[in-house]
Amino acid sequence: MDSSKFPELKNDSLLRAATGRSVSRIPVWAMRQAGRYLPEFRQVREKHDFFEMCRTPELACQVTLQPLERFDLDAAIIFSDILVIPQAVGMEVKMVPKQGPVFPDPLQTPDDLQKLNFSVDVHTELKYVYDAITLTRHRLEGKVPLIGFTGAPWTLMSYMIEGGGSKTMSKSKAWLYRHREASHKLLGNLTEIIVEYLSQQVVAGAQLLQVFESHAGFLGRALFNEFCLPYLVRIRDGVRARLSALGQDKVAMTIFAKDAHYALSDLAASGYEVISLDWTIEPQTARKIVGNGVTLQGNLDPCALYAKPERIRELTNAMVTEFASGPYIANLGHGMYPDMSPDGLAAFVNAVHETKIIA
Ligand code: CP3
């Protein structure tokens, strides 16, 4: 499918806010906005395996567009998963209902790195993601921009070693302490793949890129500075250089380093245009640390969507008012949960848009 002639973008408030320009309304979207809280998503999911959905552009496109039919959102995020990269380098990943991702054969010792194929051709192996992006860009008809994404190296490494979710990350953190060199090798190799993967998403039509370092909070400052931040910077700089070599326009990039308040000032200096915040930091505290040169995104506690609509509205109005003194994109502090009501998200999205911008 042709990725050169896309329909003209009609609502650019997300892209304007991401690069610090003025907006006529505050843009809003929600992490996991395409997911099981939507009955129409569950209907598709009943008939298909999760990764089959990721690998079938027509299905990925269909569920990406579903939330836009219901809510007045300012962005779409391509339906996929961060774990497509471990799959691309040769690991098996299953999505087990009610349990989440499972790696039947996780990495145990540094010798296991030899089993992985880091020279994989990202163009062919992950082509299904680019195809889904291109198809979705056309089907969006310029309504809102399309966000592409990746998992960040540490978060991917931790899944590859833990073999799934973990309360402590003790196996993967053991690598950082015991197998320092092998850890850097793995993180470096993942970084190279991520740079190419994100750049190709832009070629395919992604208009903003979000990097999910969902497990940053397990690290603390010292481990973060050694095993996380340098790779996030390499991804930022690498994508910028690669896009310019490919003759592509620049795109804004967002870093979501969950639970890493300790790193906010470092992240503000890391070259990402947008910092996405979890809900455990107050808007004004974050703004004081990062200043007005970086766009903030977030950060309503997702569980606030369990409240009655009137309460969601109050909480959202208050949050937006506090953030909107600087460049800002409204979002949740993490993803939606499957048992949430679509009405909660509707209340959130509408409350963002009704909040008057004072700045
Ligand atoms: O709507 C969107 O945000 C776009 C799609 C998206 C998914 N996963 C779809 C998904 C995105 C951006 C992700 C990213 C992702 N995947 C992250 C980073 C964000 C975060 O949550 O911190 C992580 C850690 C993963 C790994 C992952 N995938 C987990 C831990 C799980 C299980 C948790 C759960 O919600 O069940 C998934 C599965 C997953 N990814 C689902 C969806 C819609 C549900 C799976 C299903 O339908 O069975």
Image: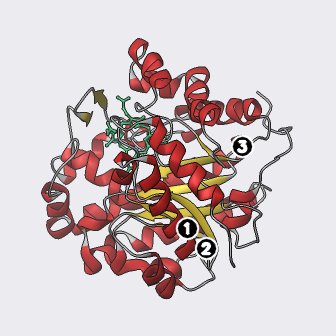
- For badge 1, the amino acid type reads Val
Give ligand 1's quarter of the image. Answer: top left
Q: Residue at x 53, y 76 (%)?
A: 322
Disc 3 target residue: 205
The percent position of residue 227, horizontal first and vertical second, equals: 33, 70
Q: Residue at x 52, y 79 (%)?
A: 268
Q: Is residue 34 visible?
A: yes
Label 3 residue near ligand 1, CB within 8 Å: no
The residues bearing labels 2 and 3 have C-alpha atoms spaced at a distance of 29 Å
Question: Marks 1 and 2: in contact by CB < 8 Å?
Answer: yes
The kind of secondary structure element at disc 3 is loop
On the rendered image, what quadrant is the N terminus found in? Answer: top right
Looking at the image, residue 47 sits to the left or right of residue 328; the answer is left
Residue 324, numbered label: 2
Label 1 residue near ligand 1, CB within 8 Å: no
The percent position of residue 4, horizontal first and vertical second, equals: 83, 39
- For badge 3, the amino acid type reads Gly
For the residue carrying disc 1, how many other residues have a C-alpha within 10 Å: few (<14), some (14-19), or many (20+)? many
Disc 1 target residue: 320
Q: Is 134 or 330 nearer to us in this picture?
A: 330
The kind of secondary structure element at disc 1 is helix
Give the total of numbered labels.
3
Question: Marks 1 and 3: in contact by CB < 8 Å?
Answer: no
2 or 3: tag closer to the N-terminus: 3
Residue 75, numbered label: none
Q: Quadrant of residue 204?
A: top right
Q: Residue at x 41, y 73 (%)?
A: 229
Q: Is 83 or 166 nearer to us in this picture?
A: 166
The residues bearing labels 2 and 1 have C-alpha atoms spaced at a distance of 6 Å
The kind of secondary structure element at disc 2 is loop
